[in-house]
Image (spheres, rainbow, N blue to C red):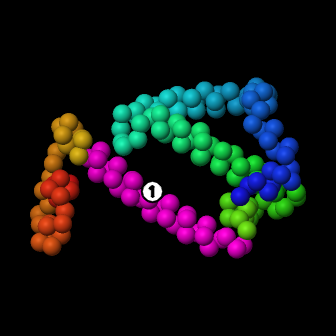
């Protein structure tokens, strides 16, 4: 969606130049300290992801490099192109880059992505709780109210214990 903004103002792509980024960091005193705080966080997140979940680190790297990163660059560069045209900055969002005929499809896609993300969070919380119980870091507890019979038949034993 940001391609039109990039095509109208290709100068926004100068932000991808690492020399430009380094000059920006060095010219601002808070830039270097901000960068120092960011890099340890990145390494902690990477070590937290390693060995967990259904995806290998290599698959995550490929998906990030081939799909997510280019899409984010185009989106933000397109928004920057709109700002360079002199448009007011209050209402600029990803949806402002979308043609009106595709806006409903974008809303549906965003809704589906939200549902998938919420399911991933629920699954992750369940998995972490189960692992904490197995490691002895958290005690298993029983509910004083047993689940309904119909629900108990459809749920797995692990989920009932959770």
Is 35 positioned to the left or the right of 55 in the image? right
| Picture residue at 47% right of the left edge, 34% below the top | 58
Residue 80 drawn at (x, y percent):
78, 51
Residue 111 appears in the figure? yes
When asked about the image quadrant of residue 161, the answer is: bottom left
Picture coordinates of residue 147, whole percent (x, y)? 15, 68
At which x and y percent is residue 33?
Answer: 65, 28
Confirm whether the magenta stretch covers residue 49: no
Image quarter hosting the N terminus: bottom right
Judged left or right of residue 67, residue 30 is right
Vertical position of residue 76 compared to residue 154: above or below: above
Q: What's the magenta region? A: 100-129
Image position of 132 (left or right of 67): left
In this rendering, the answer to whether 160 lies above or below 12 is below
Which residue is at a point 68% across and 27% down the rendered structure image? 32
The one of 31 and 132 positioned closer to us in this rendering: 132
Residue 96: quadrant of the picture: bottom right
- Image check: 157 left or right of 65? left
Residue 99 % position (x, y): 73, 68
Can the viewer see residue 147? no
Which residue was labeled with disc 1? 117
Would you call the spot at circle 1 few (<14 residues within 10 Å), some (14-19), or many (20 or more)? few
Q: Nearer the viewer, residue 22 or 103?
A: 103
Dominant secondary-structure state across the stretch colored magenta? helix
- The residue located at (50%, 29%) in the rendering is 43
Residue under the image location 52 percent in, 28 percent down? 40
Q: What SS does tag 1 mark? A: helix
User: Above or below — where is 116 with respect to 24?
Assistant: below
Q: Quadrant of the C terminus?
A: bottom left
- State yes or no: residue 125 in magenta: yes
């Amino acid at each position: 969606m940001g391609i039109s903004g990039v095509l109208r103002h290709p100068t926004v792509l100068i932000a991808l130049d690492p020399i430009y980024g380094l000059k920006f960091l060095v010219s601002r005193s808070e830039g270097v300290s901000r960068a120092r705080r960011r890099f340890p966080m990145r390494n902690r997140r990477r070590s937290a992801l390693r060995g967990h979940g259904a995806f290998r680190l290599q698959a995550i790297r490929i998906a990030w490099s081939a799909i997510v990163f280019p899409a984010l660059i185009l989106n933000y560069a397109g928004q920057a192109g709109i700002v360079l045209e002199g448009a007011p900055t209050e209402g600029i969002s990803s949806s402002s880059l979308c043609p009106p005929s595709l806006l409903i499809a974008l809303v549906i896609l965003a809704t589906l992505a939200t549902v998938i993300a919420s399911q991933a969070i629920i699954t992750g919380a369940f998995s972490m709780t189960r692992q904490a119980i197995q490691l002895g870091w958290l005690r298993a507890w029983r509910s004083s109210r047993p689940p309904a019979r119909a629900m108990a038949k459809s749920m797995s034993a692990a989920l009932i214990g959770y």
